[in-house]
Amino acid sequence: MYEKTIRIGSYNMRKARGLDQRRRPDRTLQVINSLDADVVALQEADKRLGARHPAIPRKMIEAETDYQLVEVSHNEISLGWHGNAILVRKGIKVIDVQRIDLTGLEPRGAVRLDLAGGLSVVATHLGLRRRDRIVQLDAICAATADCRRTVIAGDFNEWSAQGGLEPLAERFAIHSPGRTFHARRPVAGLDRFALSQGLHLHDAGVVQDALARRASDHLPIWANVAVYPVVA
């Protein structure tokens, strides 16, 4: 059966502030480039206060990567929506973009990106409280109910390997490529992928080189995903 493989990356970039407490977007972009992904979901892509200015200048993304920024911000300033930004490799066709509001103690959100070929990618950063995360996952499932092939990528903020992910159980297989937090000494796999039916995980991993261990408090993850044709 014909299949197409796409590489998805996810990275909580901590607003480009490394463990040395220096804000270095150039270093963050080096880590992003090392993923060699077709689509990259970014969390904490914008500064927290005020107008939420981008942690990486747009011109730097254009000049130093092979990616284009998917426009998801509602204020024409930020890179993302509630800090969630998406980069796609130049030449990949984006069909539609949707912002998803996620309720909870603190404002959260997700972004759904529909690509040519019938694949949706959702980038998200879930809340700190499990009861909020469960409601947020319910909302993501509802917002992707019309898409038969969906990848959810992001910082799930869930320390348990099983608990708190029940809303995904019916439609998604959850994959944790490895321990990603804290980057200095990883003990928890907070960053994950969830793949719907019609998708198969070929391979996945965590970037653990010295640069990634300094650039953020999270390590980035990647997954090679096989996309199978939808059978009527």
Image: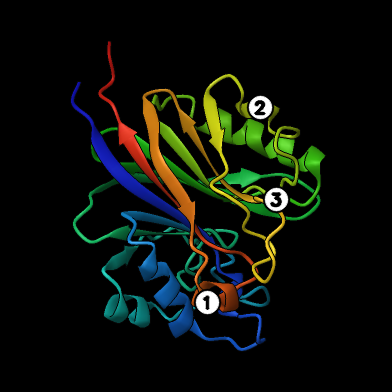
Q: In the displayed structure, would residue 122 be above or below residue 195? A: below
Q: Earlier in the sequence, mark 1 or mark 2?
A: 2
Identify the residue at image location x=47%, y=68%. 79
- Kindly state the secondary structure of the residue where label 1 is placed: helix
Point out residue 65 in the picture as x, y percentages from the top left corner.
30, 73
Query: The C terminus is located in which quarter?
Result: top left
| Labelled disc at residue 11 | none
Q: Dot 1: few (<14), some (14–19), or many (≥20) neighbours within 10 Å?
A: few
Identify the residue at image location x=40%, y=27%. 147
Name the amino acid type tagged 1.
Answer: Ala
Q: Dot 2: few (<14), some (14–19), or many (≥20) neighbours within 10 Å?
A: some
- Kindly state the secondary structure of the residue where label 2 is placed: helix
Q: Disc 3 marks which residue? A: 157
Judged by depth in the image, the label closer to the viewer, 1 or 3, is 1
Judged by depth in the image, the label closer to the viewer, 3 or 2, is 3
Q: In the displayed structure, would residue 199 be above or below residue 126? A: above
Name the amino acid type tagged 3.
Answer: Asn
Q: CA distance from mark 1 to mark 3?
A: 23 Å
Please report contact status of discs 1 and 3: CB closer than 8 Å, yes or no: no
Q: CA distance from mark 1 to mark 2?
A: 36 Å
Q: Disc 2 marks which residue? A: 167
Point out residue 213 in the picture as x, y percentages from the top left corner.
58, 73
Identify the residue at image location x=73%, y=50%. 127
Q: Quadrant of residue 31?
A: bottom left
Q: Dot 3: few (<14), some (14–19), or many (≥20) neighbours within 10 Å?
A: many
Please report contact status of discs 3 and 2: CB closer than 8 Å, yes or no: no
Q: Depth check: give the residue in front, 75 or 214.
A: 214
Total tally of numbered discs in the picture: 3
Q: Disc 1 marks which residue? A: 210
Q: Earlier in the sequence, mark 3 or mark 2?
A: 3
Identify the residue at image location x=66%, y=51%. 190
Q: Earlier in the sequence, mark 1 or mark 3?
A: 3
